[in-house]
Amino acid sequence: MPKLKKSERFIFTSESVTEGHPDKICDQISDAILDELIRQDPESHCGCEVLVTTGLVVVAGEIRTKGYVDVQKIVRRTIRDIGYSNHDYGFHWEDCGVIVAIDEQSPDIAQGVDAGKGKFKKQGAGDQGLMFGYASDETPELMPLPIIMAHKMARRLAQVRKSNKLPYLRPDGKTEVAIEYVNGRPKRLDTVVVACQHDEAVAEERVKRDVLNKVIKPIAGKYFDRKTKVFVNATGRFVKGGPPADAGLTGRKIIVDTYGGQGSHGGGCFSGKDPSKVDRSASYMARYVAKNIVAAGLAKKCEIQFAYVIGYAEPISIMVDTFGTGQVSDQKLVAIIRKHFDLTPGGIIRHLKLKRPIYKATAAYGHFGRKEVSFTWEKTDQVKILRKYL
C-alpha cells in the first residue's frame, strides 16, 4: 500500500475462497499428503502438486521419505471432508479418478538441503527466491482488514453449510470485500461480494436474504452500513461449481493465502512444500518478524523481504519497509532482525517447530492472522526483546 496523504480516501479490495473451491481442494490435498509424510518421517522432503477437474484428481511431484503414503486414501478422505459427498454435485470422493505421478527428489537438490553435504555444510535453502512478510496494526490479528474479513466470510459459508443452517449450500464459494480507508485506517465496508454454490431448487431471493443475514452481517459488524453495496451470486445462479465447472491447481491462490494484495508477494506458493523449501518457511518467518515488530510498537505497518540462494544458509538480502510509520529507521530494523532472529532454513525450522504435521489446516482461509496454536509464526513472543529499541 502506498504512503498516504493525511486526508486521502481510497477503497482496497481483497478476496477469499471456500475450502470447496477447486484450487483450495488441491492445496488441501497437497498439504494432507505432506502432513502424512511428516507424521511418519519428520525429515521427509516434499514438493507435491495437484490438479482437479471433472471426475479426476492428478497428484504429481517429488518426494523423499522413509515413510509410505496411501495417496488414493488421502485424496478421497480430503475430498469427503470438504463436502463433495453428493453425486448431484458432479464430483464425488468415492468415484473420482486418481492418477499418481510422483518421482524421487533430485539428488542435486538433496545435497544442498541436507546438513553436512554439498558445497556448504549448513542446511541450505531448498531453492532460490524472494519471500515477503507483512503486518499492520489495523486489526487485532495485525493483518489488513479486507483479507481478514473475506476469510471470515468464506469460512462462515462453510460453517453454515456443514451445520445445516443453510443446507442448500454446496462446497464451492468465493468472497470479496472492499473496505473504504480514511487517513490510512479502515472506515467502513463499501462493497461485499459473495458467490455461493447452491442446490437447483432454492430461490435466488432466499439465497440472497440468508447469506446477507447469516454470513455477511455477522462478520462485517460495525463496518456494515446503509450505503454498503451487496452482491450475492451476481449472475443469478451458481448450481454447477467445483471441479466440474473450473479446473483447480495447487498454488493458484497465493494472494488469498497471504495478505490479499496488501504488501508484496515473492511468487512462490506454500502448499505441498516441506519446510526446507524457503518459499514456505521463510515466508512464515517474515510474517513472524513483521508481526513482532508491529506488536512491539516499532511500526504501525511493516513489510519484510528475505532472499535466498539454493544450497546456501544465510539470506543474501534483508529489506524492511515501515511505510513511514517506524519508530526507528528501516536500516536499524534490518540490524535488529539480523541480531535477534536466526534466518537460516535450519534456524527457522527449529524456532517455528515446522517439522510437524500442521499444514493441512493452513491450506484454506489463509496462512496468516489465525489463532490456532500450531501456527507458531503468529506468536508475538519477541515483543519484550524488541521493545527495548523504542
Image (cartoon, rainbow, N blue to C red):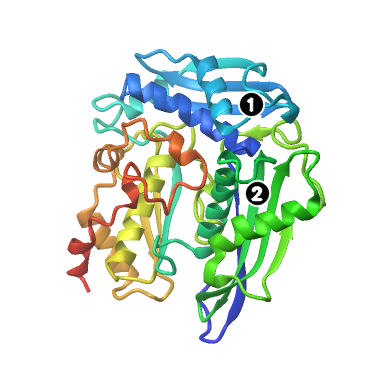
Q: Position of residue 55 (x, y in %)?
A: 71, 22
Q: Which residue is mark 1?
A: 85
Q: Report whether 238 appears left or right of 60.
A: right
The residue carrying pointer 2 sits among few (fewer than 14), some (14 to 19) or many (20 or more) residues within 10 Å by Cα, namely many
Q: Which residue corresponds to the image point at 62% horizontal and 15% vertical from the top-left?
A: 99
What secondary structure is found at the residue carrying circle 1?
A: loop
| Residue appearing at x 73%, y 60% in the figure | 231
For the point 63% across and 53% down, the residue is 175
Query: Hey, what amino acid is under mark 2?
Result: Lys
The x and y percentages for residue 82 are 57, 33
348 vs 95, nearest the viewer: 95
Q: Quadrant of residue 346?
A: top left
Percent position (x, y) of residue 44? 36, 23
Residue placed most toward the observer, 32 or 336: 32
- SS label for mark 2: strand
Q: Is residue 49 visible?
A: no
Type of the residue with mark 1: Ser
Which of the two marks, 1 or 2, is nearer to us in this view?
Answer: 1
Above or below — where is 316 with respect to 85?
below
Quadrant housing residue 114:
top left
Badge 1 density bin: few <14, some 14–19, many ≥20, Cα 10 Å: some
Q: Closer to the N terminus: mark 1 or mark 2?
A: 1
Marker disc for residue 174: 2
Circles 1, 2 touching at the beta carbon (< 8 Å): no
